Image (cartoon, rainbow, N blue to C red):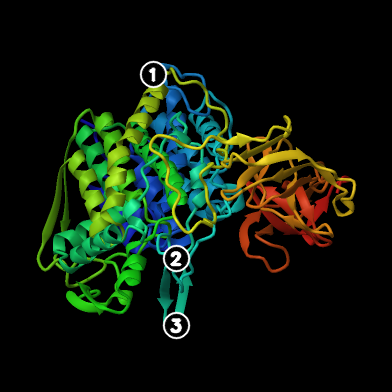
Amino acid sequence: MRTYTKLSRSCLPLLILCVLLSGGLTLAQGLPSAETVIDVAESPDPLHQVILPRLYAVIGADVSPTLGDATLINRFRFIVSLAMVDAAAPYHPTAVGMYSRIPRRPEAEWTDANINTAMLHGAYQALMGLLPDRHNVWSDMMRDIGLDPDDASADLNTAVGIGNIAGQAAHDSRLHDGINQTGNYQDTTGYMPANSAYELRDPSRWQPGLRRQGVGVYTVQHFVTPQLANMEPMAPFNPRELRVAPPIASHPHNQEAYQAQADVVLETSANLSDEMKLQAELFDNKIASLGLSYIHLAKEMDLSPADIARGYFLKASAWMDAAIVTWQEKTRFDAVRPFSAIAYIYGDQPVAAWGGPGQGTQEVPANEWRSYLPEPDHPEYPSGSTCGCYAHARALQQFSGTDELNWSVNYPAGSSRVEPGLTPARDLTLTFDTWTDFAAACGQARHWSGVHFVAAVEASASYCGTFGDRAFEYYQSLMNGSAALRQPAQALAADPWRQSERRATTPIVVPENTYPTPQSCEFAGDAVTVTAVNSGAMCKAADTSDFSEAADFLDAIVVTGELDLGAQVCFGQPGSIVLLEEGGTVPRFNELRSYRAGESTCAWIERPGTVILKALPQFSECAVTTTDVINFRRAPVRGEAIGIIQKGVELPVAARTPYWYNVRFRGRDGWVSGDFVQPNDHC
């Protein structure tokens, strides 16, 4: 049995719950407190004791105040735990790193002190890359446990050097994995909702919600990270080969089914019990449900510090891979949420439903109906939370070798976050005997909360366990040393089924087990790839003799034919992409949203025209060196400060204005003032 001298294992859930309840940066900067001094040599769980409390508090302040934006949160968790697992690999008989191959250390060095030191330095390097604006939090974290954040050793004979190299490799190898970290996670797909928050033009498709932030202050939802569909998964599989059946009942042409699934949501809303409400709240908070269930498992299995990190990495990987395919299908179907469908069907007619916090069941106008929990910022079908829970459960079934869970969550009377002081009416305990029960309850909770139709839950439940199996199979190959060294992750090519705008008034019906084959234009050549679903898309060489405004062009191709579903055009070299539309008498160049896919520069087009690759400004050898401690800004002049750069740092330049330089710092693009830098001779 492991000995816990500084912080008992039973305190871990309390530590995490403190973070969940606080939601503030004060906690992130102050944990662990002076009363819970942690000795790195004796810490039984640096992941949960040291790293996650600070990470969750920073996420709550900077990324997701409700801790509900699972796509970003889970990517942070995946990369941090990956860094820790790769750092621990040299202290294991057979394990290898995913993105680093560090020589195995002698068995005499396989101590918790060395492993913890390596893992913490690995996590520190990953955090500095992922969330550099909070460098003070991460530095304080290391100092609080007696480690030197400024020790940049790369000596692979030491735990510090092993951790630094593994952490940097983990972060850098996922930097261009398709989620657009270097572009502040902005959409690279060109997604546009068919409906506005104020008008439901297409009742089959997602409508962004309108949320009140304060008195008279409202915000409109945006599809969160739709580009997740293009992220390279952890397990070796092709997401484009995995599809779910269309949400047939979510199209009003199927009037009876459309109304029936909405009525089921209303009936459930009108009959919510305290247990249903609290189960919905539990699984809405992924850190509480997935995080604390894993802490319980780690306690039951009496895991070592390294094995705690490994199990965490496994479950985070399974969730991430499940999310990639789920986001692919969410983008493909762009399906309507219950609140929009209910308002569309019944208008201002009264319906019986939950009337709001503390109101019980009421008769409310249908167009004022609200779900028990806020609707997530993405289309409805299939259910992402359900899919993640099934992947999480299956991965940990495999990891523990049993379906048994025996986990309970106690809710004192009045502890609901939606109905504080009222729900539950008396102390209540939720119990999950098995991982199978856990996953099923998670799916039920998404329907009970009012954010999903039953079909979205059932679709995810039917196929999402496979991601846990795939993740565990790859995890085993890392542990037994058979996994090949992975090359840096690259974005997937755009899904041929992607539709940023559906022009047809009826849904596209996909024949069972048949999918469109991407068409490559016959005359594109090796330097240009044009991928389109439409078999009628055609290409030809471009006549660029009249492109006086595009004298800096590098390559061009003419794409013609029907492009109802759009096409992806990729040039095999760096640049920016513009489109000259057909039919114009005077050339007019429309700049497209360009993105990198491996070594290629790509853009998505939705209408025929001449697609041109223009050269980037020639700053390939230009660099500036900071002459003082300066702000790193999101935009020139009065742009938001997104970091601090120390004196004497050399920065590569991508572009400039007369007084500002666009530079890259720690994997991010931003601007620095020309008053505080010294350019070299190539600028």
Q: Position of residue 609 (x, y in %)?
A: 73, 50
| Residue located at (79% from left, 58% from top) | 584
Q: Position of residue 588 (x, y in %)?
A: 80, 59
Callout 2 touching callout 1 (CB < 8 Å): no
**Relative to 498, is 658 on the left or the right?**
right
Callout 3 touching callout 1 (CB < 8 Å): no
Task: Give the CA separation, mark 3 to mark 1.
Answer: 58 Å
Q: Mark 3, mark 2: which one is toward the viewer? A: 2
Q: Which residue is mark 3?
A: 216
Q: Is 118 above or below relative to 650?
A: above
Q: Mark 2, mark 1: which one is toward the viewer? A: 2
Look at label 1 and name its amino acid: Asn
Look at label 2 and name its amino acid: Pro
Q: Which residue is mark 1?
A: 480
**Relative to 478, is 390 on the left or the right?**
left
* Tag 1 secondary structure: helix
Q: Which residue is mark 2?
A: 208
Which badge, 3 or 1, comes first in the chain's sequence? 3
Dot 1, how many residues are within 10 Å of its Cα: few (below 14), some (14-19), or many (20+)? few
Viewer-proximal residue, 653 or 15? 653
Q: Mark 3, mark 1: which one is toward the viewer? A: 3
Q: Quadrant of the N terminus?
A: top left
* Tag 2 secondary structure: loop
Q: Is 355 above or below relative to 681?
A: below
Which badge, 2 or 1, comes first in the chain's sequence? 2
Q: Position of residue 81 (x, y in %)?
A: 42, 38
Viewer-proximal residue, 273 or 42? 273
